[in-house]
Image (spheres, rainbow, N blue to C red):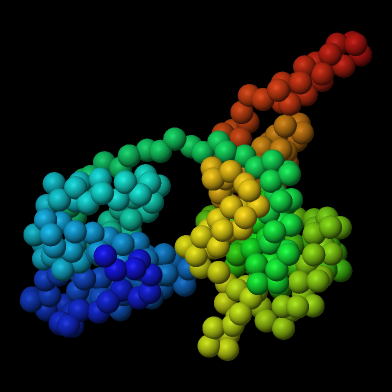
Amino acid sequence: MTQLSGPIPRSSNHLYGQHNMTTVLEIAEEYFSSHDFKNLRDETKASYQYFLRVAFETEVDGTSLGSLNHASITTKQAKLVYDLWCDRGIPFANHIMATIRILYNYAVRMEHCNLNPFSIVRRRSSTPRKVLWGREDIQKLLDVAYSDFSTRNIGLIAHMAYAWCQRVGDMRLLTWDCIQFDKARVHIEQSKRRAEVFLPIDDDLLDMLRQQHEDFGFQQWVAPRPKPIGGEYIPYSQYKLPLHARKLMDEAGLSSELRLSDLRRTGTTEMVEAGVGIGQIMSVTGHANPQSVKPYMKNTYASANTALTARKIHGKST
């Protein structure tokens, strides 16, 4: 099996839009040349290409999915490959499924086929993660990451995600024009729903960012890969960053259950346990719906103690 990285291999047949364009890969090549694809954000393009590459390398009866006739794939085969993807994790499988559905919807609109076989497959639901970092875990990661200049930026990405309760992906792509050093605040436009948040920067993080600016302020990214590629500094990819972070987390002796994506949940849960109101939490996290915050409001001793203490104080004052 080939590596799941790099560009999707091009087919030897480039007869876009013609009758003999038959393989799934050829449909993808046309889609990548379409306005539908070109109008997407660069990050979304990279995501689609990655997940389609994984899909195309999946074998169906000994043949890779990408080399199959696009109109010959049945719903039964679509269900088979989805089950194979689920072996790598349900969220991962659902990302692949969502992407290949987009590709086939394009094929249907362009009249390359009449049916999207993947649209009928029912996706599995995964149990929401509840794993939280401890503050000592975060400090251990920072200690290891900041012990080497080549890994420091991974630590900074993690620390910003936790401190500001933001998605790691947004911190990975944060640029210097978002940082207002004179006002000690950051302006973040979230990639998922385009929500904008304006957040304070505490003194410790501000010092870290000032040092970071001295070292990396000559280019646009706050925490890029530490070595340029082709003379250009670029962000960590959304697929490679967790792998690099995992090595640091193992070195720090952290639980294998922890993920960088848990940092946003951890920070948000800490606000809930501190008795912060939902409206204020939403102003930090960027959630537009209070219902989206409720999963963070789990039953814990800290939250119960806060509630009962408030009740007791209120009772004494009446």
Q: Is residue 9 left or right of residue 195?
A: left
Q: Position of residue 281 (x, y in %)?
A: 70, 42
The quadrant of the picture occupied by the C terminus is top right
- Of 141 and 93, the residue lying toward us: 141
- What residue sits 18% from the left and 64% below the top? 64
Q: Is residue 121 left or right of residue 23?
A: right
Count of numbered circles on the image: 0
Rendered view: 86 above or below 65? above
Quarter residue 106 falls in:
bottom left
- Of 12 and 116, the residue lying toward us: 12
Q: Is residue 209 left or right of residue 114?
A: right
- What residue sits 37% from the left and 44% below the top? 90
Q: Position of residue 270 (x, y in %)?
A: 71, 38
- Of 253 and 246, the residue lying toward us: 253
The quadrant of the picture occupied by the N terminus is bottom left
- What residue sits 65% from the left and 56% below the top? 158
- Of 268 and 190, the residue lying toward us: 268
Can the viewer see residue 212?
yes
Most extreme residue toward the bottom is: 231
Rendered view: 119 above or below 171? above
Q: Position of residue 125 (x, y in %)?
A: 37, 38
- What residue sits 33% from the left and 39% below the top? 124
